[in-house]
Image (tube, helix red, strand yellow):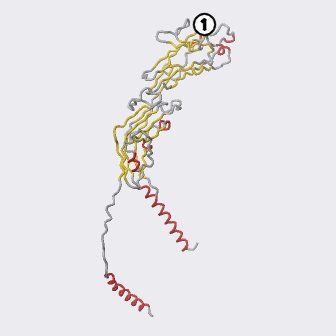
Amino acid sequence: MKTTTKAVLAGGAGIALLAGGSTFALWNDTETVDAGEVTSGQMTLGLSGIAAWADVSPDAVTTTWNPATDLLVPGDTIAWTQDVLITATGKNLVAELSVDEATITGDAALLAALDISVSVTDAAGDAFDASAITPAMLAAEPGPYTVTVTVAFPAATGGTTAQNEGIDLSTLGLELAQTRVL
Amino acid sequence: MARGTANRVAVVLVGVVVLLVAGITAAGALWRTSLPLDAGIADSGSMSLAVNGTTSYTVPGTALSTIALGSVSPVELTLQGTVAGKNAAQTLSLDGVTATNPANAFASNLQLQIYALSTGQSCVSGTQAGVKLYPAGGATTSTGLAQGATFRARPFVARGTTTVVNQRLCLRFSLPTSTPSTAQNQTTQLTFLFSGNQVRP
């Protein structure tokens, strides 16, 4: 059989199949099912109250600390506290609250000399695991939560290291990030 | 490797890479919210110690050039201390005195007394008023070798002091009458190492 003849027969078969499409018009029926709404959760951070500095050096005569006038020296430990509100909803939501220490800038020698740490406590003042916050935890321990940034100037700092320098904590980044093992 | 096999391997590798990239992208795209906090600034303080207004002071040679056996050559110094810091205080100590030509008869016989002077007290060759710091203890007339002289840390700048604190010292040099004649026309240079140390209250 010639190739041309084969092509003609194949085309005709195709047209016949397309014409047969009318078989889709056989009986059919549809029903609607109400699956309700699907709503997304929420994760928010907010400030509560007024932040404050305190002198928590064990030998401090007073606990007040005025960053505008008071100067750090070796042996000092000061703490900055700010209450925050956390909202987290979602069946499988897990989030971590952290402070981005990269947002703390200033003199390199002073930054190197200082020990800066961050902790979170609940409304009762108890330690709060901010690394895996869940809606259930928030329901059990309602806020506000207190974020504490502790700045310690070790007494072992010798010589005249890091005198008359400063660090800037005015753009401290507090972050709540969802975590999930995918 | 045949071309067909190579293509299959390439497809598998691309698939793995795509899956890895997809996984990383998904992890980075989870919810995230941040809140800027203003904790202000924290500044460090300072402390300093100076002698007669400088960090290094040389006693004029004339003050000691006429020292004679049995007499006292008084030299007065003023140490200045400052601290800046809510919880800072400073002590003052003499950590040591070294001498050049330490073995010569002059240097090895040179005696010293150090007194802390209060307002109204002068540094004199006669009877000295003030608090004797070196040598520690003993009678007010006792002396010690100039080389190696020290006095222990004593309160200097109190916490909360915002002004310069001055401490006048009287260095009383002498040569005992037992000094051998070989000490004549000999020289030595003394270096005093004073320390201001920050202390916690």
In the picture, measured across the screen, residue B111 lies left or right of residue A148, that is right
The answer to whether A40 is drawn above or below residue B188 in the figure is below
Marked residue chain, label 1: B
Quarter of the image with the N terminus of chain A in it: bottom left
The answer to whether A81 is drawn above or below residue B27 in the figure is above
Using the rendered view, name the quadrant where residue B180 is placed.
top right
Residue toward you, B166 or B58: B166
In the picture, measured across the screen, residue A142 lies left or right of residue B183, that is left
Q: Residue furthest bottom?
A: A1
Give the residue at mark 1. Answer: B71
Secondary element at image label 1: loop
Residue toward you, B200 or B181: B200
The answer to whether A12 is drawn above or below residue A179 in the figure is below
Residue B193, given in percent of the width and then of the height, sits at 57, 22
Residue B142, given in percent of the width and then of the height, sits at 61, 10
The residue under the point 41% across, 29% down is A63
The residue under the point 44% across, 53% down is A179
Q: Residue furthest front?
A: A140
Residue toward you, A128 or B99: A128
Residue type at tag 1: Ser
Residue A61, given in percent of the width and then of the height, sits at 44, 26
